[in-house]
Image (cartoon, rainbow, N blue to C red):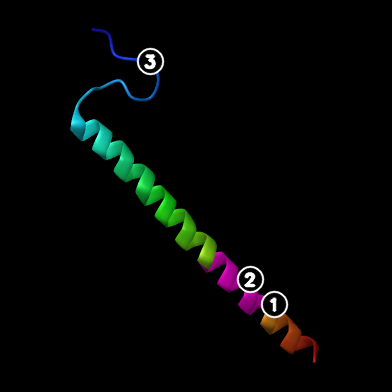
Amino acid sequence: MAPPPGLYSGTSTFALVARVSAFSVGVVYGSIKLKYLKVKAKSQRKAEAKAHH
């Protein structure tokens, strides 16, 4: 039986788990980074507002 075309060419459970894990880590990392950037932007705006007064 030929493997399906595309990213997932194996049929092992490990390969599937590895892909799901990598995706999950990416999602978590992305959301943490987004939160960090939002907080950073907020504190920068606060600092700029203080500097103007």
24 left or right of 45? left
Span shown in magenta = 36-45
Residue occupied by mark 2: 41
The outermost residue toward the top is: 1
**Other residues around mark 1 within 10 Å, as few (<14) / some (14–19) / many (≥20):** few
Residue 4 drawn above or below residue 48: above
Element type where label 2 sits in the image: helix
Element type where label 3 sits in the image: loop
Q: CA distance from mark 3 to mark 2?
A: 43 Å
Residue occupied by mark 3: 5
Q: CA distance from mark 1 to mark 2?
A: 6 Å
**Residue type at numbered disc 1:** Arg
Element type where label 1 sits in the image: helix
Q: Position of residue 34 (x, y in %)?
A: 53, 61
Going from N to C along the chain, the mark reached first, 3 or 2, is 3
Residue 51 drawn above or below residue 3: below
Q: Magenta span: helix, strand or loop, mainly? A: helix
Residue occupied by mark 1: 45
